[in-house]
Image (tube, rainbow, N blue to C red):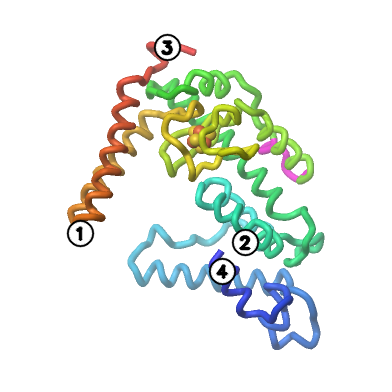
Amino acid sequence: MNAIRVLERLVPEGALLFDAAVHDPARARTRSGSLGSNAIRDRIDAFVVWANTEASRHDLPGQRIPPDPHGRIGTARFRRTLAWHIARRPGGLVALALQYGHVRTALDTDESGRYGTRSRSGIHRLVDIETAMATADAAADLAERFHQGEGVSGPAARKALLRATTGPLFQGGLVKRDFPLKHELARRHLAREGSVLFDNPHALLLCLYQRDRALCRDDEQLAAPVLDRCVPGCGNIVRTDQQAAALHQRADQLDHRAGLLPAPIGDRLRANAVKLRAWAQDHDLTRFTAEENPT
Ligand code: SF4
């Protein structure tokens, strides 16, 4: 979102955000419209060099972007990476919801892969596909953890386990090149209300979204949960041992930070830590395992 704002200030009013005349003035006479694929690839290369230089400068070898076995990163893979992050980070969904029109306009491409088109064939369909894949991963992960002995809790836990082990799978990951078919499968998968499991790393829970039970939806008829507005006590919640342990960990971090801050802020952090521990305790008291309750 910040990047879009900067781009808006770089180009004249009404121009494309990646206007070739602004971003590639040496070629401004020979081309009009947006930057071409090669120019975008050069910029992605430059970004990788910058990121790796920063990683070395801060002694963070784990943050380096390794050489890519598939070659240079082009626009298609860059957009898919972006969609992957948007689909898996609740904050990303919010940013997208707020900025959807503009970001989509900026990131959609036309048939030739050039940016700036207003067609509806771009990143929003990629986000649908990545979201469907993320929900399928969440369901597979839940089933695996449960069968390996992990405990689960929450009002939607039994139903989620049933769906994760016996429900229809998302087949879109198997479709390699047929993008419209892949998108159609994703759309149908996400429309199966009460069967789609969203990971919510922000609230440390899983959400088996069912519209009529959702406490995050206000009066709107939302087709998907508002993960960053998750409300404790919602009937769609599922929680695993791993997530409960992460709640304890987050509470400890809050307490630690609270000790370093002035009283009013510290008190607020400590109150949050108490809340997180209460949710974790609730999980510990109500959890069940495969051994106790085989599904
Ligand atoms: S409030 Fe309920 S529906 Fe909304 S994100 Fe949280 S668990 Fe899901």
Report the span colored magenta.
Answer: 172-178
**Badge 3 is on which residue?**
293
Of the residues shown, which amino acid type is indicated by label 2?
Gly
Residue found at x 76% / y 46%: 179
Q: Amino acid at mark 1?
A: Pro
Residue at mark 3 to residue at mark 2: CA–CA distance: 49 Å
Q: Which residue is mark 1?
A: 262
Q: CA distance from mark 3 to mark 4?
A: 50 Å
Q: CA distance from mark 3 to mark 1?
A: 47 Å
Residue occupied by mark 2: 71
Q: Nearer the viewer, residue 199 or 72?
A: 199
Looking at marks 3 and 4 on the same chain, the residue that comes earlier in the sequence is marked by 4
Tell me which label, 3 or 2, sits earlier in the chain: 2
Crowd around label 1: few <14 · some 14–19 · many ≥20 (10 Å) = few
Q: Residue at x 39, y 57 (%)?
A: 62
Tag in front: 3 or 1: 1
Q: Residue at the spot x=49%, y=18% of the render?
A: 158
